Structures are given as C-alpha cells and as structure tokens.
Amino acid sequence: MIAISLRFLTGRFHATPWGHHVNEGVVEWPPSSWRLLRALIATFHRARPSGVSEEQLIRIVDALSAPPLFRLPPATTAHTRHYDVANGSVKFFDTFVVLDPGDPTTCVWPEAGLDDGDRTALAVLLSSLGTFGRAESWCEAELLEEDELREPNSYPLEDGQSLSGLEPVRLLMPDSTGRSLIDALLIETSAMRKKKQLDPPGTRWVTYVRDSKALTARGAAPPRRTASKALTNIAHYALDSSVLPLPQDALPFAEQVRRALIRNRVDTSHSETITGKHADGTPLEGHEHAHYFPTDEDLDGRIDHVTIYAPRGFDDADLEAIGSLRTIFRSGNRPEVRMVLAGLGGPVSRSKDDASSSAFTRRFGEGDPAEAGTTKLSEVSIFAKARRWRSVTPFSLPRFPNRGGGKPPRPRDLPEGQLVRELKNRGLPEPVSIKRIEGYQVEGRPLVRWLEFHATRFNGKAGNALAGFEIEFAEPVRGPLAVGFACHFGLGLFLPVS
C-alpha cells in the first residue's frame, strides 16, 4: 500500500483538466494521477534530490500507474480575473479549488508496493515537490502510514454502480509501464500539437465518482442561519461564454437562471424566495422574493454578470442551489454560459448607509481560507447610490396606457404616470425629472430599441407596452431600482448615470 498526503498551503489548488481551456472555468478535482506523476518527474529533473536515481524513479512511477483512491476534503471553487493588456486586454479566468490548508487530500494505491529504498526515494521526491498544479498551488506532500488513512470518498466507477448522491468525473490516467511510461510522461504539448494528437500517448480516461456536494458551497460548510449572523440576500455571478447573451435577452436568460436554481435544490421543500410563489402556486405579494438582474457591467453590449437579490434572504437550501449553479444551457445553436459565483453578501438597505448595509462580503462558507475581503456594494452597479438613473432594459407597463378623455371619460394613464406609481409602491420618492429615451445605448455600438427586447415570459404573459426613461431624484437613492412587469426577471431595470 502506498498513500500520499497533499496539503495545499494557501488553501488553493489551481489545475485545469486535460482538454479544457482555462477560461472554461473547469477545475480538475480530484487531481489526476497523470498530473501527479508528471510533477514527480519534473521534481526529479528540477530539484535533483540526493539519493534518488533514474532507475528508482522508473519503479516509483510504475508503482503509481494504477488508478488511486482519493479522500477529498470539503471544498468549493472560486476564481480571479486577469486582463492581458499587451494582448488587446484579453480577459482570463483563473478558476481554482478552495479548501482548508489543514485538511489534506489523500491518494491511496491499495495494491501498490515499494521496497524500503524506493519508498525512501519517493519520500524524498515528495518533500522536494513544492507546488502541485500551477505555480500558485503551493503544496506540501508526504507519505502516510496505513493507520493515518481515512475512508476514501472518490474512486473509479464500478459497472452497474448507482450514482445516487454521486457525480461522475473523468480523470487522465497512465496506460503503460516502465520506460515507455516515462517517455509518455515527458512528452511536451507542442510535440502533440504537431502530430495533431488530442490525448497524450500512453494514457487512458478513467471515470471516477465523487460526492455530488464535493465542489459546491455545500461542501465547504454553507452559512447557517443564526440569530447573530447577518442575513444573506445577494448572490453575484460573473458569466463566461464564447458568445455572451445580448441585453435584449435579459428576460429569458433571467428565467433560465431561476429554473436552474429550482432544479439545483437538493432539499425538495418549496422555496418561496427562489420561486416567488407559495407552496400552492399562488404568487407572493410584495417584492421580497428573488430578483434576477442580468447586467452589462463592462458596457460592451453583452450581458456579463447576473445578480440575484432577495430582500427576505436565502435559506440554507437556497444557498446550496446557488453554490452549485455552474452552467446555463441555451436553446438552438447558442453556446452554453458558465456561471462563476463571485460572492455572497447582504443585507442592503435603502434607509441607511452604514458599513453593515453597504458591504458586499465574498463568502464561500464559514471559516473559509479563501475569504477575499470586502467590496463596497457600490462597485456592483445596481446597488449604487445616485440621483440620476437610466433604463438599461425597458419598463414594461403593468396597464394599457391611455391619454384620458373619451366617452365616458377615462383618467390619463401614461407611461410616466405608471412609472411614478411603481416607484412609490417600492418606497421610492417621485422623481423631479422624467425624460423618455429611445433604447439601450453603449458607446461605439448601435442603439438597441426597446421593441427589440424580449418582453414575454415563458408562461406567455407579457406587459402592455415598452418604454425607457432617464430619471432624476431630488436626493440620491440607493438601488436596486427595477419596476414594472417582469421586474423580477431583468425588465424595468435602471442603472446609475455616471
């Protein structure tokens, strides 16, 4: 038996699975033994550890070529974004696994064996490892004894095995031995590209299973609601796709996000916050349930963020569903959109502006080593405080507009009047100025007229007319500011005028 402990000192494991681009936001978890063997060979040639010969290296790699068993600690994912200014400011996502540095990842080969000399050589190699994955993954590796092991929770899928509570994941494994395996492990990606090879020679794909909660906020101890703990009512996602949605697709995309969250709830009890309905299907009164706000934060004419805001707050099952939301699949030939959870936070209040109500804390679980500090809610544009606001999606009128008059006479009910009424219903003051605008406009791009926006929900319901405004209040007000029909799904959204 050979068992190796991998302890990630910064609480991060950076590794992209073979065959995926870094911008896909996919992480390799558990780590493949192919990656581990390449790391050992690189350590042998880089560190030149004393007392380890090439013959010993061959025997060590050969012994570790079988698929191992893993014991994975609770973990979740996070990401950073980088802009390559020298290359046209291309954006890169660096998605990584977040875990407790004090809780190691264990790899076990139950049937493998090495003599005392080779086992000592392996221990020396592991002590010289330094990093595992990309260079940011500082790692401390060591051999373990059998009495130090814990029950594995990730292992190769067996024929006919039930996947209840489990999810499959493919890992790249060696498929050769001896010197041929060493040669396969030494092959460079550039050489493979010249030969038009997709997978390295001498490898095979093995399907593993892991707990369905292994890489979500559930696996990292989601926040538990206590009397002393602040309410969580905001979830902020960054989007990544080869083709991001257009602003005029805000309504259908927001509805897709809602449906995905409903599917993601492992707790099958009804969520009034996410659905906006009682258990019997009747709609909730007021606007305390979830609002889904797709936004174009970088003003390039594409939706790149989604913020979910629920004044009443999310329960633990809601947070689990939010943490496990990864992908939105779109109809037709449109590419999927990857959802990267940037943080959880709250509460936000229009009535006060202290630190507790204006802090957006990136929380990925209690005691998480990846705690990323605090960002002001004003940096998330919908929560800014401003006097002037402009429509970025059309205000869909709740009632049919009319100019009054006729026989019998009807009261005037123009879009401006309906807007004022909707703002008042949300506890906002009446604007001192209301000016109509023709559509959504970003610099350097054609105007998107309000009639180009999707304004009919999946259930067939629609508002009565579409209009957009630039409004100004006597005093600054805090967002979010969304009113009218389908305001919980991205319509009627205003953003501050900078």
Image: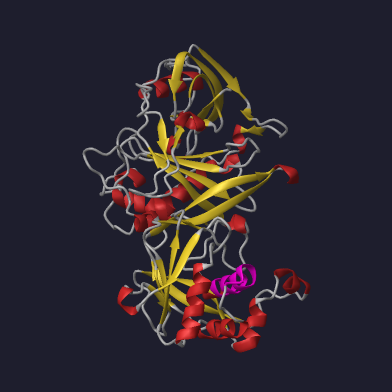
- Front position in the image: 195 or 444: 195
Residue under the point 55% across and 63% down: 133
Rendered location of residue 439, percent (x, y): 62, 29
Residue under the point 27% across and 39% down: 229
Residue under the point 46% across and 40% down: 307
Rendered location of residue 137, percent (x, y): 52, 58
Q: Residue furthest front?
A: 50
Rendered location of residue 281, percent (x, y): 29, 48
Horizontal side of 77 relative to 188 (left or right) equals left
Rendered location of residue 476, percent (x, y): 46, 17
Task: Please count the marks in the image.
Answer: 0
Horizontal side of 329 relative to 407 (left or right) equals right
**Does the magenta portion include 44?**
yes
Residue under the point 65% across and 30% down: 441
Q: Is residue 293 above or below residue 175?
A: above
- Front position in the image: 116 or 132: 116
**Does the magenta portion include 211?**
no
Q: Is residue 495 above or below residue 231?
A: above
**Can residue 306 be seen in the rendering of this structure?**
yes
- Front position in the image: 177 or 431: 177
Q: Is residue 117 above or below residue 128?
A: below
Quadrant in which residue 292 is drawn: top left
- Front position in the image: 244 or 11: 11
Q: Residue furthest left?
A: 227
Q: Where's the C terminus, which quadrant?
A: top right
Q: Main secondary structure of the magenta part?
A: helix
Magenta region: 35-49
**Colour approach in the figure:** secondary structure
Q: Where's the N terminus, which quadrant?
A: bottom left
Q: Is residue 375 above or below residue 334?
A: above
Quadrant in which residue 8 is drawn: bottom left
